[in-house]
Amino acid sequence: MNDHLILRVVGKFLIPYVMLFGLYVQFHGDFGPGGGFQAGAIFACGFVIHTLLFGSRSTEQIVSIGFLRVISALGVLVYAGVGVASLLLGGEFLNYNVLAADPITGQHIGIIVVEFGVGLTVASTITLLLMIFAERGLPS
Amino acid sequence: MLTHLPVLVVLAPLLAAPVASLMRGAFAPWVVATLVSWFSLVCSLLLLAQVGEQGVIVYNMGGWEAPWGIEYRIDFANALLLVLITGMASVVMPYARLSVRQEIGEERSPMFYAAMLLLILGLCGMTATGDAFNIFVFLEISSLATYTLLAMGKDRRALTSSFSYLVMGTIGGTFYLIGVGFLYVMTGTLNIVDLAERLPALSDSATVRTGFAFIVTGICLKLALFPLHLWLPNAYTFAPSAVTALIGATATKVAVYVLVRMIFTMFGVEFSFVEIPLSYVLVPLAVVGLLSASSVSIMQLNIKRMLAYSSVAQISYIILGIGMGTAMGLTAALLHVFNHGIMKAALFMSLGAVAYRMGGVELKDMNGLAKTMPLTFWAFVIGGLSLIGVPLTVGFVSKWHLILAALELGWWPVVVVILVGSILALIYIGRVVEAGFFKEPADNTRREAPAGLLIPLWILVIANIWLGIDTRLTVDIAEAAAAQLMAGGVVL
């Protein structure tokens, strides 16, 4: 897309705001509409725009496929880890009440960490899917 | 920790799958997958014992009580299924090491074991949960893992067979979801027990009936009931050996369990068999499927494909039992779910061992196997006898109960069909046995499969005979499960 100057400039300008909005949806998720899945998808859009405008080679210099794989697995572990923590603290699986002395604080901590895990996995998986497909078209 | 058993069965593979996917080489992820399968098996057995002592076990996810939260609800039926799934995983995983090293290669092994663990997670989750929507979520997890695993076969046709299963499986899953959506609109709840309490009052509603039709059709696609079985033969034939063994033994069985849960617990016997005459749909399809799939498998030259068609026929036996709508029929169906799992896994695993040594499972590869690979071949023979339903094997136990159930209703033609099905099985297994015993091998050297494949295989073969002689365990549990299911969802 070397000839699309306007797209490249506007894209470069937009990417940080797209990602910031992703983070907002992520961390505001327990008060307003949002949550890990939506936030992850929005955040990954930053990488998708970057790949479309500058090619997957240059995106891979920012996040490598190996790194994305680790993150996508890590997100699941964060999610399940909260469940294990609540099991070990004597509650049911994913019972956030036991995570803090006060059940309401516990619910906040629980949902934020769980949604963060979901966000990590969704964002990295979407980017990973795009990059694996994009790699296929490149001359090796 | 014993109160957390229902979630531990599902949690262990959930934690292990991402860990396995990050490992390098083939050995470490294999160790993780094997240990986790064994752990889940121990949990399932403890659960089964707990259900025997305390009755139905309810576990509220996240501490939210049903119907607001998701509950896991374990009774005899799903405890039995959990033992089947984790038990099969526990034998297939040790077996997978050599077979996967040859068929998949070291590089893709971590992802392979991660997908296997996700498959087990999905199947256990579908079985353990008491929430109709949660079943769909786990159904998708297990299906996505299945598509990946099927596509990993060496043959390039594995890709197209996996894709066609993806299309059919997605239609099945979507139908199920649409059905659940209709019920949600009418009742405002997704909890199965809660639905079971509210649905009888709405049984005249066209929406509920449409939902019922969508749910039953969707699940029947997943369990490969004739004529919705067309995805199955190719999927089984081209998949890696270990995958065929695990999926052939568990995946369709879990779909059968979901069908049973829906029509008996959720809609209730009264609705499913009196108001909507489901027997008139299921029984003819099962009879036709049984005869046609058995006949088609006689003509197959690829033995794995032959067994795949035989699976369609065996599923028809199970559906026949369910279609009777009686406690005895249901007992026979649940028994056959368990027993067919054991025998089909043994047969597919012996074929995997043949593929490991001979490089193929065509009928000509079976020539003279009794001389060149006697232990593998005898395992196939015993598994085959069990499939036919010879006394002292598990196959006899479940067919006997099925015949008793048909006699109880006075369905003489159905009894004849069951017996004809056994004769057809005798013919297709007989062809392989004939090739193995009486034909000359191309190369007469002895090349028995390695112990890593033989030990798991023979554990299953012995289980086939053991549970065929000592029927107390399986028959008692199946009868107790059928009694619980016939009573509907409202009973505690």
Image (spheres, rainbow, N blue to C red):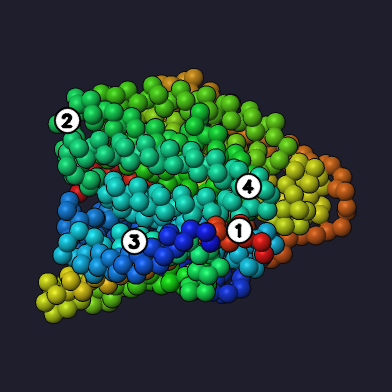
Cα separation between marks 3 and 2: 42 Å
Rendering coords of residue A131 (x, y %): 52, 62
User: Height in image: A15 above or below B74?
Assistant: below
> Mark 4 highlights which residue?
B158
| Direction from residue B1 to residue B383 in the image, left or right | right
Between label 3 and label 4, give the one nearer the viewer: 3
> Mark 2 highlights which residue?
B202
| Subunit ID for the residue under disc 1 | A
Between label 2 and label 1, give the one nearer the viewer: 1
Rendering coords of residue B343 (x, y %): 57, 47
Cα separation between marks 2 and 4: 45 Å
> Mark 3 highlights which residue?
A42
**Quarter the N terminus of chain B occupies:** bottom left
> Residue at 12% across / 72% down in the picture?
A104
Rendering coords of residue B484 (x, y %): 28, 44
Quick one: B389 or B349, which is closer to the camera? B349
Numbered circle sitting on residue A136? 1
Q: Quadrant of residue B258?
A: top left
Q: Secondary structure at mark 1?
A: helix
Q: Secondary structure at mark 2?
A: helix
- Amino acid on which disc 3 is placed: Ile
- Amino acid on which disc 1 is placed: Arg
Badge 2 crowding class, 10 Å Cα cut-off, few under 14, some 14 to 19, many 20 or more, is some
| Direction from residue B94 to residue A105 in the image, left or right | left
| Subunit ID for the residue under disc 4 | B
Quick one: B283 or A125, which is closer to the camera? A125
Q: Secondary structure at mark 4?
A: helix
> Residue at 78% across / 53% down in the picture?
B358
Cα separation between marks 2 and 1: 54 Å
> Do dots 2 and 4 share one subunit?
yes
